[in-house]
Structures are given as structure tokens and as C-alpha cells.
Image (cartoon, rainbow, N blue to C red):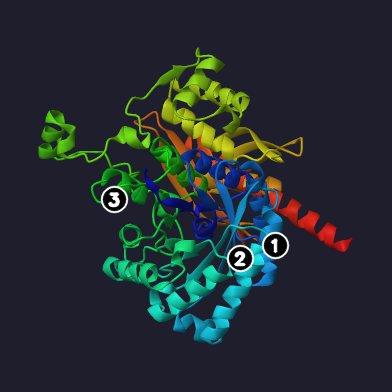
Amino acid sequence: MADNVIIFDTTLRDGEQALKASLTVKEKLQIALALERLGVDVMEVGFPVSSEGDFLSVRTIAENIKNSRVCALSRAVEKDIDVAAEALKVAEAFRIHTFIATSALHVEAKLRRTFDDVVEMAINAVKRARRYTDDVEFSCEDAGRTGIDNICRIVEAAIDAGATTVNIPDTVGYTLPMQYGEIIANVMNRVPNVDKAIISVHCHNDLGMATANSLTAVQNGARQIECTVNGIGERAGNTALEEVVMAIKTRQDLFKGVDTRINTQEIHRVSQMVSQLCNMPIQPNKAIVGANAFAHSSGIHQDGMVKNKNTYEIMSPETIGLKKEKLNLTARSGRAAVKNHMESMGYQESEYDLDKLYEAFLKLADKKGQVFDYDLEALAFIDMQQGDEDRLTLDVITSQMISHLPASAFVQVELDGERLSEVSSGGNGPVDAVFNAILKITQIDLKMLSYNLTAKGEGAEALGQVDIVVEHEGRRFHGVGLATDIVESSARALIHAINAIYRAHKVADLKSHKHSH
């Protein structure tokens, strides 16, 4: 029987902390549902005490996830633990993850306490969390720079207090594999009650060692890996889920009898979804999920691949759900065909709005003629990011640019059901002119922080996706737009960001109204 390594995904907590703009509750739920299908054992979905938005998203995910254990983070503080339990209590079963720093640097400089104090705080935090659930995880923050005697002491104390999982994180990505493996081996050999808990590892990639450290830890007895999709996270990121899972699967000669519950066929799709919703492009040479991961360009490699795929391919693209063929549809294809294509790519009907997707598909098919599976997936992703109650929608857009003259644009929108239009001239280009017209209508004060254009699909017929990040009243908002025309996709991205701002205002108004009563 396989000795399973528990996959603990922290994309929605540690990964989300590093994003340029926060995800909406709807976007977080989409990712959580995708992680559930991927087969993650535990998903850490937020830090509920940090904000009302985080509390709401943790509660929403806890209500909807049935096949993975939902977890929330808390400091070793009573209020944090109580708020985490309150957010999670709607789940059938849940985990509370509490942590405190243990390295001399953190204990003395940050906490300004003694190590004895820290051990006592850890014991109290675990005992408080155990009031709410029998699934409690304790983490020794900055364990990579903590003396081994202190690590063993606090691990033993946390397990005695009731921790069922104890995490030994390399919080700042400082250790190297041999050193980190030694720490885990010491914990396994020196802590007398270690058999009563799962030892977990949480590695950061500051020196590019996160995957290697996590795998070495497993070889030394750790049985939970904390990781994120695409390795997103603070600074240089976290251990990449897809890397540790595929390394264990591909190198069974070194991990005999050790496996994970991950459905690897879902890896590519979840990777693409996280990249899209988080506005975090995947570098082409990224292991497992990069665009070049299965591309062979040198003549020698291509010759070998033709003769035998195993010459240069240690795993097939199909194992991660990457299909080589590109299915296509036309404007004559019906709703059933669109639904079937989505199913063939692994999407369930509950994940997208078929009516909205079909409407967008028809418009695109009229413009492009043929619509490929990657076009359909791009349209579905955009639908996932749109709000249910958008106040602002785009009706008509025209722009004009003549060499050496300022650009001009005409934009017509619907705002709260009212049709409004504006002409703008004097822009630096057609996109700038359109942006100026939209901002004149909405009267929203914002600062453009980034603008990125990427091709979704292949060749001259590819869709243009625009991602922008804007700042409004000290907060950052992400906007995304997709169209065959770059000016239109830019306008849609700005409108998406403005709708996110309107939603934030609505939440703030509700919050102030609640507190005033």
C-alpha cells in the first residue's frame, strides 16, 4: 500500500499574499474548486483575522468544498484562533494552522521574548485550537535558522498539547537540501512523541531550493509538503506543487512506496487558471507547466524524439492533462458542441455560465471564423473573472489614429442602466484616448500601475488579452479584457477594474453602515 504524502496547498494564502492585486471572493472560490478536483488533501485558504474580505472568502470556500480539508492560518494569539474557527465552522471538517517564530533572530528582534515564552505561547495556541477541531497544525516559523535543540523541544511540546501536524518551514529559503534533510532526520529521530503527528515542510525558493528541500525532507520522513500552484508566493515563491508531485511520480525508483493523491491530469488546467486569475504569467522554461516544458527545438533532440519519445522526454505531456490537438468550432456549432468542448478540456458546467460563454463564443466566431479550444478556454476564464452585478458595461467603441496627430475615441457605456457616451481627443494613442473617455464618464480617480498585452492562442488570429493593475485610494485592482481588437480588450480591462472598484466601495459602505448601527 502506498505511503501517501499529504499535499497541503497554500496558493490562496501564501500565494495570494504576493499578488499585485487581491483576488475577489468569486475568483478564490474558482481556484478552490479547481484545487479540490486536482485532489489536494488540505487547502489553506486565508488568514481570517487579517480582513473582513479574507474572513468572507474563507467562509465561502469552507461552505463549498467537500472533498479536501479546508484550513485557515492564525498567529499564536487567542483572537486569531477564535476568528479562524468562526470562519471555518460551516465546513464539515476543518484544520486550524497556528504559528510562532522560533529562530533566535525572530524571537529576540521581532517578538522580544525568551524561547521559554515562545514554547508556552505555542502550547496555549494549540490547546485553544483543539477546542474547535481535532485537526490542528503548528508551525515553527523560520525553523531553517533555529537551533536543532530548540526545534526538537518545541515540536515535542506542540505534539503533547495536541498538534496533529507539525510544520518545519524554511521560511526565508536559507537552507540547502543536505542541511534541511538533516533537520528533518533529527526531528524524526530525537522527538520521542513524533509518531503521534505528521511532520510537514514548507519551503521558500529564495535560493532556488524549495523543490529539492521538500523532496529531501520526504526522503527523511516528512509526510506533508506545503506548496502552491506554479510556485507563486512571497519573494521568490514557494515550493511548486506540480514539481514535487511529478518528481515523486516520475522518480518512483527513489520514492518507493511513496505517492500523492493528486490527479495529475488536472495539473495543466489548474496551472493555467491560477496564472490567469492571479495575473501571474508562467515563465516559458518553468518546469512541468512552462510553454517550453515539452518543446524540443534542437535538431539532435527532434531526431531522437521522432525515433523514441523517451530519448528526451521523461514524462508525457498527457500525464499533466496537456492535449496536443487543437479542436475547432465555427459559428454553426451549437451550444451542445461548446459544452462538449469544455468537457473535453476538463471543465464542468457548474464552473462557468454556458449562456454567457455561448454568447461570447458566437461573437468571436463571427469575427474569427474558427474558434479553437484555447480561445474557448480564454473566454471561460474571462467569464470567471466578471462580477455578477457589474454596474458598468461597454456598448460601443470607436477610435481613430492618424500619423503625427493626436488620437481620438468615442465610447458608449451603460452605467447603472443609463446609457452614457463621451468623445475624447488628444490621447497619446487610441488606447489612451479610449481610457480618457471612460474615465471622463465614470469620474473615477485612478493611477495606471501596469499594462500588459498577451496573445491568447496562436498565429495572426490570436485573441489579445490585456491585463492592467490600477491604484485607487491606496488599493490595487486588477482588470482583464479579451477581444480580437487590442483597443477593445484594453477598454474591457479598464471597465473590469472599475467594476472591482465599485464593488470595493459597496463593501466599504455596507461595513460603515453596519458599524454605525
User: Which of disc 3 and disc 1 is earlier in sequence?
Assistant: 1
Q: Circle 1 sits on which residue?
A: 83
In the figure, 28 relative to 476: above or below? above
Q: Which of these two is toward me, 135 or 469? A: 135
The amino acid pointed to by label 1 is Val
Residue found 62% across the figure and 71% down from its top: 125
Q: Circle 2 sits on which residue?
A: 74
- Residue 211, quarter of picture: bottom left
Q: Which of these two is toward me, 147 or 386? A: 147
Q: Residues within 10 Å of mark 3 (few under 14, many from 20)?
A: some
- Residue 129, quarter of picture: bottom right
The CA distance from mark 2 to mark 1 is 9 Å
Residue found 55% across the figure and 80% down from its top: 118
Image x and y of residue 257, in percent: 32, 47
Label 2 residue SS: strand
Q: Does 208 sit left or right of 376 as displayed?
A: left
Q: State how many labels appear.
A: 3
Q: Are marks 3 and 2 in contact (CB under 8 Å)?
A: no
Camera-side mark, 1 or 3: 3
* Farthest residue, direction top: 332
Image x and y of residue 357, in percent: 57, 27
Q: Does 214 sit left or right of 86 as displayed?
A: left
Image x and y of residue 215, in percent: 32, 57
Q: Circle 3 sits on which residue?
A: 255
User: Would residue 463 be seen by someone viewing this image from the given angle?
Assistant: yes
Label 3 residue SS: loop
Image x and y of residue 286, in percent: 32, 49
Q: Quadrant of the N terminus?
A: top left
User: Which of disc 1 and disc 2 is earlier in sequence?
Assistant: 2
Q: Which of these two is toward me, 381 or 122? A: 122
